[in-house]
Image (spheres, rainbow, N blue to C red):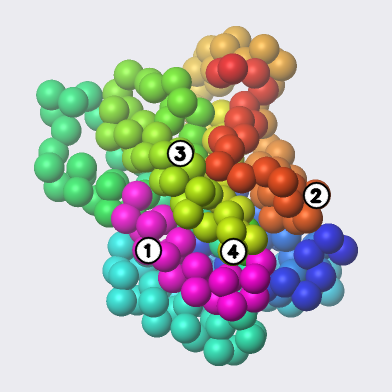
């Protein structure tokens, strides 16, 4: 139980990678709060799964793009649970498209969600973490934030921004015993990748030295590691979990 007595918030924790992180972190003893934007049923399902295995969990609704809503939610969490120790800023969207056709509306939306949302959550988490003199902030980046990808200039840009944000915050918060890191997943098996044709999936696998697509649990294991004292001397780093597709 590496996280016994800790309080963790996983944004976008109702499905996919976020859900796997929530389940794994809860399994290590942390009280785990799952945020969701609109899908209450999925969030409740994740909470029920955690509780069925003896964990403590609850769901909270807010939009990470709304700073006032973020601040209110964090105050509610810290008041109810006496603090906040771990933030996995996982909530994000992908709006792909070639730059010549990319709309200002989509650009605004993706940056507001992926960059502003992560910043708002990190900012709200700092005060309770400073009070506890212990904190872990984990941003969910992407392999394309490191390597780039055609048709994903906006998305790649948001994920690369998280790398710089984490490194700066790591320096800013280190004296307060708060570490800040990024997990950069490669191709992970999700509803989105499962919808691809077998030919497309084979093409993806051919780009990965380990020869297979990763699972959400691979990312969740990394989140537990970075959240625990096993990673107490690691900060300002980007942990690539991608099967070797980018080195």
Disc 4 target residue: 176
Task: Indicate whether residue 211 is drawn in magenta.
Answer: no
Q: Nearer the viewer, mark 4 or mark 2?
A: 4
The x and y percentages for residue 4 are 81, 70
Tell me if label 1 and label 2 are in contact, CB under 8 Å: no
Mark earlier in primary sequence (3, 4)? 3
- Distance from disc 3 to disc 4, alpha carbons, whole Å, reads 20 Å
Position of 144 compared to 183: left or right?
Answer: left
Disc 3 target residue: 163
The local crowd at label 2, few if under 14, some if 14 to 19, many if 20 or more residues have their Cα within 10 Å, is few
Mark earlier in primary sequence (3, 2)? 3
Query: What residue do we see at 49% from left, 85% from top?
Result: 76
Position of 106 compared to 140: left or right?
Answer: left
The x and y percentages for residue 58 are 62, 78
Magenta stretch bounds: 115-134
Q: Is residue 74 above or below residue 107?
A: below
Disc 1 target residue: 120
- Distance from disc 1 to disc 2, alpha carbons, whole Å, reads 27 Å
Quarter of the image that includes the N terminus: bottom right
Secondary structure at numbered mark 4: helix
- Residue farthest toward the right in the current orientation of the protein: 1
Mark earlier in primary sequence (3, 1)? 1
Q: Which numbered circle lies on residue 58?
A: none
Mark earlier in primary sequence (4, 2)? 4
Q: Nearer the viewer, mark 1 or mark 4?
A: 4
Mark earlier in primary sequence (1, 2)? 1
The local crowd at label 4, few if under 14, some if 14 to 19, many if 20 or more residues have their Cα within 10 Å, is some
Quarter of the image that includes the C terminus: top right
Q: In which image quadrant can residue 99 be found?
A: top left
Tell me if label 3 and label 2 are in contact, CB under 8 Å: no
């Amino acid at each position: 139980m590496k996280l016994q007595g800790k309080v963790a918030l996983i944004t976008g924790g109702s499905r996919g990678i976020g859900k796997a992180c929530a389940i794994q972190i809860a399994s290590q003893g942390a009280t785990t709060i799952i945020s969701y934007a609109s899908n209450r049923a999925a969030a409740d399902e994740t909470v029920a799964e955690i509780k069925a295995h003896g964990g403590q969990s609850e769901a909270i609704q807010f939009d990470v793009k709304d700073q006032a809503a973020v601040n209110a939610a964090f105050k509610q969490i810290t008041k109810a649970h006496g603090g906040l120790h771990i933030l996995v800023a996982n909530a994000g969207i992908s709006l792909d498209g070639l730059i010549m056709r990319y709309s200002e509306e989509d650009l605004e939306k993706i940056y507001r969600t992926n960059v502003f949302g992560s910043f708002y959550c990190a900012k709200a988490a700092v005060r309770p973490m400073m009070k506890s003199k212990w904190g872990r902030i984990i941003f969910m980046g992407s392999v394309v934030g490191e390597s780039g990808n055609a048709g994903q200039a906006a998305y790649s840009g948001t994920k690369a921004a998280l790398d710089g944000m984490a490194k700066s915050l790591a320096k800013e918060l280190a004296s307060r015993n708060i570490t800040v890191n990024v997990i950069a997943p490669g191709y992970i098996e999700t509803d989105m990748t499962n919808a691809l044709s077998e030919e497309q999936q084979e093409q993806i696998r051919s780009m990965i030295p380990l020869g297979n697509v990763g699972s959400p649990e691979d990312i969740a294991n990394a989140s537990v590691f970075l959240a625990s004292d096993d990673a107490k001397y690691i900060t300002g780093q980007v942990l690539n979990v991608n099967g070797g597709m980018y080195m």
